[in-house]
Each structure stands twice: as structure tokens, then as C-alpha cells.
Amino acid sequence: MIRHLVYILLLGLTSFLFVVCGQSNEVPASEPTATPKPAPTATPKLAPTATPKLAPTATSKPAPTATSKPAPTATSKPAPTATPKPAPTATPKPAPTATPKPAPTATPKPAPTATPKPAPTATPVPLLTAIDQEDLTIVKNHMAMGTDPNSGPILQGFPFEGAFPIHLAVLKNNREIVRVLLENGAQIDIKADNSDEATPLHWAAFYSMEDMVTFLISEGAPINALDANGTSPIDSANYAKVLSQGNPETLQKLNSIIEILESNGGLSAEELTRLSGIESTPGVESVEINTYGFKLIVDGSISIESSGLLADNAREQDGIVFFQYEGANTTLLWITGSDQDELLPDIYTQIVEAQPELTFSLINEGDIAVDSSQGKYLTFVANSDSGEVEAGGLTGVWTCPTDRVFSLTVTGLDPVVLQIRFKRLIDNFTCTP
């Protein structure tokens, strides 16, 4: 078997109290009894009686009374009362009141208000980051500052590469952010900057966002816009259905989306082509494989390799062709007289055994119809030893009336690309040339 699995790298808070006592001396009683009586009796009575009464009575009363009262009363009252009151009252009040108020009020307020606010608002959070975080306030700030909503798509190599701000807002299913972007000039029909070039409505339909589909249509999204693969939004919803078998809730949403699109005039690319009378997209080269008893039309320029299964070269009874189809490694195999129910698991087993260093897991299985022939399909992913998804793929089988069983396998990096390529190929396949 041909090995076509491509590795990928899919997809920041521990008192003392002192008492002093005096001492008194006593005099003997024999000495004062004989001598001291006449001497102290005549002299001490006149001297101490005349002097002490007049001196303290006449001098002490008028002197302190006449001098001490008028001096403090006349001088102390008028001096402090007349001088301090007018001086502090007239000078300090107008000076501090008139000067400090206008100075701090006029200078500091406009400076911090005008400078710091626009700087942090414009720089720290890019528009795409604000949308991813669903921060409506920062998105509005970007719009107020003139950020272009139709520039700066997600860079190549990152998840959802090529998505413009409105694509990302659609993926977040945030109608308010989409509304703000549209009100500020976002193009509702802008195509993603990647190989598929799908519009926001394509994305909403593919990712089963029923309310967003209704909202975008009400805002004027073109119902039948075609992407680079020539597919319409209804085709995107149908592609998603192929991958959602076994998920009733998602299938119900996708069926509702298809009904909404159809009720608003939505058509598949095939219906649009038939109505327009154009057999192929103008300017798009195509390759037709029709030398082995069937026909497969591949849009774009491809280089085809072929080999036989039971013989050296491919032939009508059996064979294999493989080619690179815009991001999808493609293998088409056919064999006569086989059983498609046995061929499908056998193909998957050979893919798994061809890449022993990877761990494969089935995602889902379901039914498909190819040129009115009923068939089955399965989808799978491959993980590295660390558990990261490294690759993915789809394999489908069907049986044509000529009793030939066909198997189509696509593998690659981008699951969305694989889904689109797979559906495009089975739509362009017919059992007869």
C-alpha cells in the first residue's frame, strides 16, 4: 500500500516616698534656775514688743497691695488684645486660599488623564486576542482607536490560520463582537487568507453554528458565495455532516442550518453550476482521469502516479492512482470482485501498520453515496507517543455497477482541508467515463 500519512503539529501565584525626720537637743535643768530670771525679764519685754509690731504691720500691708495690683492689671490686658487679633486675621487667610487651590487643580489632573489611558488600551491586547478572550470592551476600544477589522489574519501554522477578526468572532459564536466589527467596517463576505478562502458564513455553516448562520444572513452575508474550492455554504454544511455521523446533536444542527440556507435561497455549487450553464470554474485548471473505465475530475494542476495491484500497471480491473491535491495526499484504489465491507477495514489496517511509530484512533464511521452507489466511510487520527495529534485522514469505499469496488483515502495536516477535498472528489467521480 502507498503510505500517505503526513505528520502534523496540530493543533501560562509571613513611687518612692521619702520622709525626713529632725532631731531636738535638751538643756539641763540646773543652769537656768539660779541666774537667768532677772536678766531675761527686764530686757526682752521692751525690745521685742516695740519693734516687731510696728515693722511688720506698717510696711507689709501697703507695699504689696499698692504695687502688685495695678501693674499686672493695666499692662497685660490691652497688649495681647490689641496686637495679635488683627495681624493673623488679615494676612494668612487670603494668601493660602488664593494660591494653593488653582495650582494643584489645573496642573496634575489633565496630565495623568490624557497620557496613560490610551497607551495601555492600544498596546497590551491585540484585537485577535481580545476576540479569542471574548473581551467586548477591548474590541470596542480597538474600533474606537481605528484598528482595521479587515487586516491582521491569524498567521500560517497556527490553528485557524488565515482567519480574519470576523472569522474568529464567528468561531467564538459571539454575535455582539461580530456586530461591533460589522458596525466598524468589517467585510461580511471577506475570505479567509488561506487556500480555501471561505467566508464567515461558510465557517458558521461548517461548524454547525445555527444562530450565527441566521444572524449573518440577517446582516447581509452572501448566501451562495463560493470559496476557492468552488463550494457554497450549503456544501460546507453537507461536508460537516459527512464527519458528524454518530453525533445526533450535531447532525440535527447541520440539518437545521441547511434548511435555513435553503429557505433564504441557498444552493449547492452543483445546483449553481447547472443553473448557470457553466461546466467548470473559469480560470481554474482541471485534470480528468478517464482511462481506467471510470471518470474523476480533479480541480487544479496535479501530477498523477499509478500502479497495478495484481499486475505491473493499472488497468480497468484493478489499479491505484495517487496525487497531491492542495494539501491532501490522495489515493484512489479499485479492484474487481471484492467486498466493500471487508475492503474498508483492510485499508485502515494497512495504513496503521505502515506507520508503527504512531497510534491510530477511529473518530467516526458512516454512509456515503457516490454516483448513486451506496458506500461507507471512516475518519481517523494518528497520535505521537506524547499523545499529540500528528495527522488525520478519511477513507471511503463504494461499489460501482461494474462490480468494481473503489476506495478513496485522503490524509494530511488540516482536517478541514481533508473534509473538503474528500467531498469534492467523490462529487466529481462517476462509475463510467
Image (cartoon, helix red, strand yellow):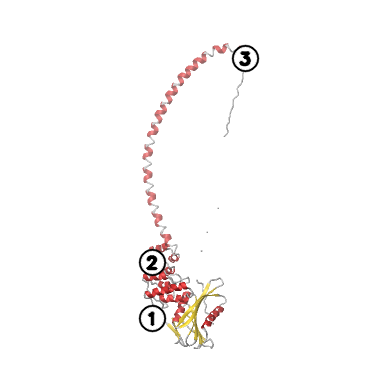
Q: In this view, does 98 lie to the left or right of 247?
A: left
Q: What residue type is labelled 2?
A: Arg
Are the residues at dot 2 and dot 3 in contact (C-beta closer than 8 Å)? no
The amino acid type, in three-letter code, at marker 3 is: Glu
Nearer to us of marks 3 and 1 is 1
- Circle 1 — which element? helix
Residue marked by disc 1: 273
Q: Quadrant of the N terminus?
A: bottom right
Q: Check contact, mark 3 vs mark 1: CB within 8 A.
A: no
Disc number lying in front (2 or 3): 2
- Cα distance between the residues tagged 2 and 3: 131 Å
x, y (%) of residue 6? 52, 76
Rendered location of residue 433, percent (x, y): 44, 87
Which residue is nearer to you in this view: 357 or 100? 357
- In depth, the one of 341 and 59 nearer the eye is 341
Q: Position of residue 231 (x, y in %)?
A: 41, 77
**Residue corresponding to mark 3:** 31
Label whose residue precedes the other's in the sequence (3 or 1): 3
Q: Is mark 3 on a helix, strand or loop?
A: helix
Q: Distance between the residues labelled 2 and 1?
A: 33 Å
Label 3 CA crowd tier, 10 Å (few <14, some 14–19, many 20+): few
Neighbours of disc 2 within 10 Å: few (<14), some (14-19), many (20+): some
Q: Earlier in the sequence, mark 2 or mark 3?
A: 3
Q: What element carries label 2?
A: helix
Type of the residue with mark 1: Thr
Above or below, comparing residue 152 to residue 42 in the picture: below
Residue 206 appears in the rendering: no
Q: In this view, does 342 lie above or below 145?
A: below
Q: Quadrant of residue 83?
A: top left
Q: Name the residue that disc number 2 marks.
A: 179
Residue 284 lies in quadrant: bottom left
